[in-house]
Image: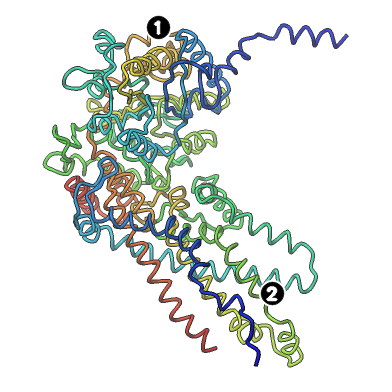
């Protein structure tokens, strides 16, 4: 009896997965003997994701894509997890003529790639209407002075304030309210207000929202560092005093100077030790999966508090896709991958925030109230400046925050040291 | 009078050394010379060298952060080398003594210690980052709390962060020192210990008057190797603290990495790499001259 049932099950097994397996391997999408090929360097978060649902979703998208483009094969190259090192290597390889035809480029690196002239315009695929639908800060980053589409920034993210409403019922709108709420929560035995303060990019980018909310500028129009000059210097010091006050008052624990990833906040939320934290929008879904439903129901998101309720900003990042080949056919293929696989369908599959306003209306996944908040907060979104000196500015801000929060330097001393180091690095370029 | 037949030692050495010299030149000398060339250029990670210049070297040497980085490197290296030697010797003594007494489990202990050695530096940093977590549910602090101690600011306090980095480095590197000392201890003639026992020597006297003097050669070799190894350590610190808080744990190797990959300054990074190389060579020479001479006189 069992044998016929098994035979029937085998016969009824859908043929699609077998086809997908043939078309998709660890280093290829499409038939091995295809006439034309495109090398594509991608991150490990989608087609080769460790999450089965994400991987299977992207396998289906890539399968549909390659079947719609007969004669093509995509040779996939997986990038490593160290973004800074990986992107520097990608740029170096491209300049030496050994880079891939198409690649994922972190939004923070678009300016560097643009300035070195390795990005090939993808105007044939993205028309004026598509460009107009991009959020302004996205458009500014990917479009050059001549109106060329140099890369397609396919998803964005932003930082928001997460809070446990059992400890912090009302969303703090200002820094003063945030400190008071952190202190009150700490008084009830929680850790209060958590944020990145260790030595990594997240620390600088999260904190910069406090500087940008006051109207601060890191670089001038020519890309020269100006963050420690004139009004910007005063804004830097005010933003430094704000986070220093959080730690010194006990509203935030001193351990924030050792926090170097967003997962620490998920862990604190799961352990019930945090009252508030500055996290990424993607953590909303993670919390939903991690916390018991009754605990998750207690967590809410709101815009990051500002110096006043009217002064808000949030750092917005994400990934783009750029064409690095001179071959027009490969450039078009690269742009089509960005448009047909990642922007839109790829966004919805992972719940990532699209960079085009229209996509939010196209997919039901964006119907949740949290997306209304994210979309509203993106109005105050600020991308990293399009200047090649940014990575060093970030490095020095991380050092500056570590020194100030650990009490190793005063805000003035730390800012002066950062400014000197960044200026020296800029002068050497 | 018959002439003695030629021995292998009579043959000229150079032809026999040529393959090894060629390999060394190819895989060590050429990269070192290339780094030297880059240090005296204006190369960046995104632009090849266009001129010969001493500006990168001058910029590196006048960098206000360099004294702090060198100070951190010196402290980290000194503390690590002392800890690595001490812990490695203690484990080796324990194993040799256990083996001589026929205790069970000595092979398992040796294997266990060696397991830490094969852990990649990044993984080592991540493991210790979890243990040192200062969250209320952090590993070590929870243990300390259960006996009424702590909590300790393992990673958020600048001084403690350096201590934590030394602990993580020692945990991983002690196995190497253990191997060196274990081999040297096994080579000591047991008759010497038997004679000491007959003379009624105490354990401490045996250690200081017999074991340690006979280990002088091993101490020298191990000192040179672990010093160079510790100077080059950056991956474990990168994963553990990233060099922070501030620059509290930013050693020279990590500073070099940051100069190249944050600053994209290939020439500056090369100049720092040369400095690191020079420091390692100088320290090795100092150790060789001080410990080596004593060893020859002994």
Q: Residue furthest front?
A: B1
Mark 2 element type: helix
Residue A358 lies, in percent from the top left, at 33, 9
Q: Nearer the viewer, mark 2 or mark 1?
A: 2
Q: Quadrant of residue A41?
A: top left
Residue B72, relative to residue A324: is it above or below?
Answer: below
Q: Is residue A181 left or right of residue A140?
A: right
- The mark found on residue A47 in the picture is none
Q: Is residue A266 visible?
A: yes
Q: Is residue B289 left or right of residue A27?
A: left
Q: Quadrant of residue A206?
A: top left
Mark 1 element type: helix
Q: Quadrant of the N terminus of chain B?
A: bottom right
- Exactly how many numbered labels are in the figure? 2
User: Are callouts 2 and 1 both on one chain?
Assistant: no
**Please, which chain is the residue tagged with disc 2 on?**
B
Q: Which residue is mark 2?
A: B186
Q: Residue furthest right?
A: A1
Residue A111 lies, in percent from the top left, at 25, 31
Residue A264 lies, in percent from the top left, at 48, 39
Residue B187 lies, in percent from the top left, at 67, 77
Q: Residue at x 31, y 38 (%)?
A: A207
**Please, which chain is the residue tagged with disc 1 on?**
A
Q: Nearer the viewer, residue A279 or A66?
A: A66
Residue B7, relative to residue A374: is it above or below?
Answer: below
Q: Residue at x 20, y 54 (%)?
A: B52
- Would you call the spot at circle 1 few (<14 residues within 10 Å), some (14-19), or many (20 or more)? few
Q: Which residue is mark 1?
A: A362
Q: Is residue A372 left or right of residue A386?
A: right
């Amino acid at each position: 009896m069992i044998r016929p049932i098994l035979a029937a099950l085998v016969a009824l097994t859908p043929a699609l997965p077998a086809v997908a397996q043939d078309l998709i391997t660890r280093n290829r999408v499409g038939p091995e003997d295809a006439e034309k090929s495109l090398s594509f360097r991608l991150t490990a978060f989608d087609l080769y994701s460790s999450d089965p649902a994400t991987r299977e979703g992207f396998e289906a998208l890539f399968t549909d894509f390659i079947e719609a483009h007969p004669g093509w094969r995509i040779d996939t190259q997986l990038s490593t997890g160290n973004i800074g090192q990986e992107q520097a290597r990608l740029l170096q390889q491209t300049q030496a003529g050994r880079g891939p035809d198409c690649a994922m480029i972190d939004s923070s690196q678009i300016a560097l790639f643009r300035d070195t002239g390795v990005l090939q315009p993808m105007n044939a695929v993205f028309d004026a209407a598509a460009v107009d639908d991009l959020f302004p800060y996205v458009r500014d980053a990917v479009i050059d002075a001549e109106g060329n589409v140099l890369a397609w920034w396919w998803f964005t993210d932003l930082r928001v304030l997460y809070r446990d409403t059992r400890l912090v019922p009302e969303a703090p709108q200002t820094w003063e309210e945030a400190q008071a709420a952190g202190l009150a929560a700490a008084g009830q035995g929680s850790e209060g207000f958590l944020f990145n303060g260790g030595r990594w990019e997240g620390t600088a980018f999260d904190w910069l929202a406090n500087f940008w909310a006051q109207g601060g500028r890191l670089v001038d129009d020519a890309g020269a560092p100006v963050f420690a000059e004139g009004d910007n210097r005063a804004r830097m010091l005010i933003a430094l005093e704000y986070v220093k006050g959080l730690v010194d008052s006990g509203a935030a624990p001193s351990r924030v100077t050792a926090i170097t990833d967003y997962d620490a906040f998920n862990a604190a939320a799961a352990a019930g030790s945090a009252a508030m934290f500055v996290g990424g929008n993607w953590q909303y879904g993670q919390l939903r999966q991690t916390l018991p439903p009754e605990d998750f129901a207690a967590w809410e998101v709101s815009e990051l508090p500002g110096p006043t309720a009217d002064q808000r900003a949030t750092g917005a990042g994400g990934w783009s896709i750029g064409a690095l080949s001179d071959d027009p056919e490969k450039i078009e293929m690269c742009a089509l991958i960005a448009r047909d696989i990642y922007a839109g369908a790829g966004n919805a599959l992972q719940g990532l925030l699209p960079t085009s306003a229209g996509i939010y209306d196209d997919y039901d996944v964006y119907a949740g109230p949290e997306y209304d908040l994210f979309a509203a907060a993106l109005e105050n979104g600020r991308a990293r400046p399009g200047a090649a000196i940014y990575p060093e500015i970030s490095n020095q801000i991380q050092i500056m925050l570590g020194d100030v929060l650990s009490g190793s330097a005063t805000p003035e001393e730390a800012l002066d040291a950062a400014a000197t180091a960044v200026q020296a690095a800029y002068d050497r370029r | 009078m018959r002439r003695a037949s030629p021995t292998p030692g009579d043959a000229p050495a150079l032809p026999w050394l040529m393959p090894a010299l060629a390999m060394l030149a190819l895989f060590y000398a050429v990269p070192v010379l290339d780094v030297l060339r880059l240090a005296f250029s204006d190369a960046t990670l995104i632009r090849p060298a266009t001129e010969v210049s001493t500006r990168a070297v001058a910029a590196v040497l006048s960098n206000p952060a360099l004294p702090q980085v060198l100070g951190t490197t010196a402290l980290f290296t000194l503390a690590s080398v002392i800890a690595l030697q001490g812990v490695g010797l203690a484990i080796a003594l324990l194993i040799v003594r256990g083996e001589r007494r026929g205790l069970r489990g000595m092979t398992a202990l040796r294997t266990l210690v060696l397991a830490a050695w094969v852990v990649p530096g990044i993984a080592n940093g991540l493991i210790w980052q979890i243990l040192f977590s200062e969250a209320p549910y952090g590993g070590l602090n929870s243990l300390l709390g259960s006996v009424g101690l702590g909590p300790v600011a393992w990673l958020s306090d600048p001084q403690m962060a350096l201590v934590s980095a030394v602990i993580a480095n020692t945990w991983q590197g002690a196995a190497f020192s253990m191997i060196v000392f274990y081999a040297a201890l096994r080579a000591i003639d047991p008759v010497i210990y038997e004679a000491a026992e007959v003379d009624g020597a105490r354990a401490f006297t045996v250690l200081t008057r017999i074991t340690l003097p006979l280990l002088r050669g091993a101490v020298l070799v191990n000192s040179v190797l672990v010093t160079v190894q510790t100077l080059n350590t950056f991956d474990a610190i990168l994963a553990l603290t990233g060099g922070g808080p501030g620059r509290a744990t930013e050693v020279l190797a990590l500073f070099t990495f940051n100069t190249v990959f944050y600053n994209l300054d290939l020439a500056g990074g090369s100049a720092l790499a040369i400095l690191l190389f020079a420091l390692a060579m100088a320290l090795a020479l100092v150790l060789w001259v001080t410990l080596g001479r004593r060893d020859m006189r002994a």
